[in-house]
Amino acid sequence: MSLISIEELERLTREKLPFARISKFRTEELKSGRAIVRAPYSNEFLRPGGTISGPIMMGLADFAMYAAVLTRVGVVELALTTNLNINFLHRPQPGDLLAKARLIKLGKHLAVGEVEVYVDGHEDMVAHVTATYSLPPPPSGR
């Protein structure tokens, strides 16, 4: 069971995460430790050569990982990326991107996970991401 709903994540995105809002990322699924997020295609994503730029894939993967973390810890605005590694595997053709994130380990202070990025409708992964998030201490009194 997810500790955050898609509606709560959308509200958090509108109010606190301008990059995700501007990029029009759409969360399609949230399950405990997992998230699937779509980046609807835009010509603005293209770089010279007609391929989707790396920073778009990195931003999408980071947001998807954040969503996966929140499914386990609830709304924690200050869960922050401390490390993100990306391997670009295939040249992504123009189209919607899908990021499939899953937590590998959730500890008291850190969350570690991975994200697979695909072009919708294609089975070849275009990027593989590993990420670590720092989790703030719980509020006093808990």
Image (cartoon, rainbow, N blue to C red):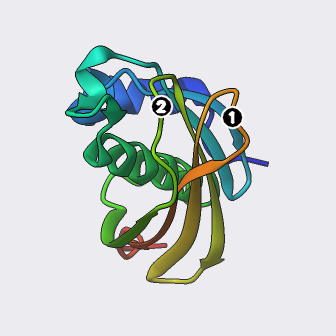
Residue positioned 28% across, 28% down in the render: 46
Badge 2 marks a residue whose secondary structure is: loop
The picture places residue 4, in percent across and down from the top left corner, at: 60, 41
Along the horizontal axis of the image, is 111 left or right of 102? Answer: left
- Residue 71: mark in rendering: none
Which residue is identified by label 2? 93
The picture places residue 136, in percent across and down from the top left corner, at: 35, 72
Number of numbered discs visible in the structure rendering:
2
Residue positioned 34% across, 16% down in the render: 42
Vertical placement of residue 118 versus 26, above or below: below
Residue positioned 40% across, 53% down in the render: 62
Q: Amino acid at mark 1?
A: His
Disc 1 to disc 2: CB gap under 8 Å: yes
The picture places residue 94, in percent across and down from the top left corner, at: 44, 24
Q: Nearer the viewer, residue 87 or 142?
A: 87
Q: CA distance from mark 1 to mark 2?
A: 10 Å
Residue positioned 56% across, 83% down in the render: 107
The picture places residue 79, in percent across and down from the top left corner, at: 37, 62
Nearest to N terminus: mark 1 or mark 2: 2
Along the horizontal axis of the image, is 74 left or right of 85? Answer: right
- Residue 122: mark in rendering: 1
Quadrant hosting residue 82 = bottom left
Instruction: Give the class, few, some or many, for how many residues have Cα within 10 Å of label 1's Cα (few <14, many ≥20).
Output: few
Vertical placement of residue 92 versus 136, above or below: above
Vertical placement of residue 37 versus 132, above or below: above
Quadrant hosting residue 28 = top right
Q: Nearer the viewer, residue 37 or 54?
A: 54
Vertical placement of residue 46 versus 61, above or below: above
Q: Amino acid at mark 2?
A: Gln
Instruction: Give the class, few, some or many, for how many residues have Cα within 10 Å of label 2's Cα (few <14, many ≥20).
Output: some
